[in-house]
Image (cartoon, helix red, strand yellow):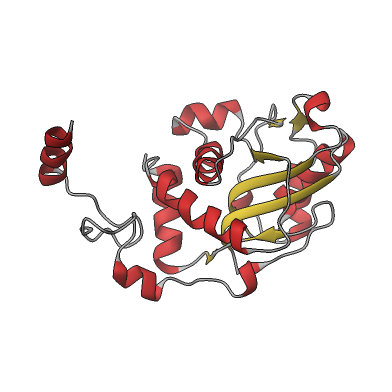
Amino acid sequence: MGFLTSLLDLLFPPKCVFCRSILSKDDEGWCIKCTQSLPFTDNFGTQEGTYYDYCVSPLHYNGVVRKSILRFKFNSASAYAETYGKLLAKCITQCPDVDYDLISWVPLSSKRQRSRGYDQAMLLALATALELDDVAVETLKKPHDVQAQAELVGKDNRSANISGAYEATDPELIAGKRILLIDDVVTTGSTLDECAKILRAAGAQKVSCAALARGE
């Protein structure tokens, strides 16, 4: 197995998920240069919502971070989830306000998941939970496919677009729980608010959120 891994690394050397430079054997998915230059947020990038208490994010959604996440979502770079999970888990553990009983994610519609081949937020949640010695569980589904939020401008338009798009999967699992909801990017917070509203209506005690990157 070690020989096969070495051979694969020789033929297909691992690259930084952000700048795509070849990694050294001690790098953890991103290179030293990016460690020093990534647009990390201040104070965990904390953002408050209407139905969720707060959302923490380790990175700003610009530059190489934006390009990397777009590859993750649309160019079959699903393996990036492992590295992203390390960054997000570190942010979660370092933030003193984060407390939860369940880790979950903002789901894609089945139509969009079939188009992409995977649900990127689910992969991110699974990878993050693994880093936290926990598991991620499904609490929401998205039976209604709507226009992509990135195509809309303004919180009101985004809130209207996403209204009614999600449903709780298992109210018994959710009832009385503090839920940590994970997504890849947060901008206005409209999607997270809609998901948190559904979870609260299903009996969740509290909904907190974590996103890999925060939009400007």
Q: How many marks?
A: 0
Vertical placement of residue 172 versus 182, above or below: above
Q: Quadrant of residue 94?
A: bottom right
Residue drawn at x 49%, y 41% as measured from the top left? 127
State whether residue 84 appears in this view: yes
Vertical placement of residue 64 versus 141, above or below: below
Q: Quadrant of residue 140?
A: top right
Quadrant where the N terminus is found in the figure: top left
Residue drawn at x 79%, y 53% as measured from the top left? 52
Q: Quadrant of residue 2?
A: top left
Vertical placement of residue 156 versus 140, above or below: below
State whether residue 188 appears in this view: no
What is the x, y in percent for residue 128? 53, 45
Residue drawn at x 50%, y 38% as measured from the top left? 123
What is the x, y in percent for residue 48? 77, 63
Quadrant where the C terminus is found in the figure: bottom right
Residue drawn at x 77%, y 30% as measured from the top left? 167
Viewer-proximal residue among 171 and 86: 86
Drawn side of residue 83 relative to residue 212, left or right: left
Drawn side of residue 38 relative to residue 136, left or right: left
What is the x, y in percent for residue 21? 23, 61
Drawn side of residue 188 relative to residue 132, left or right: right
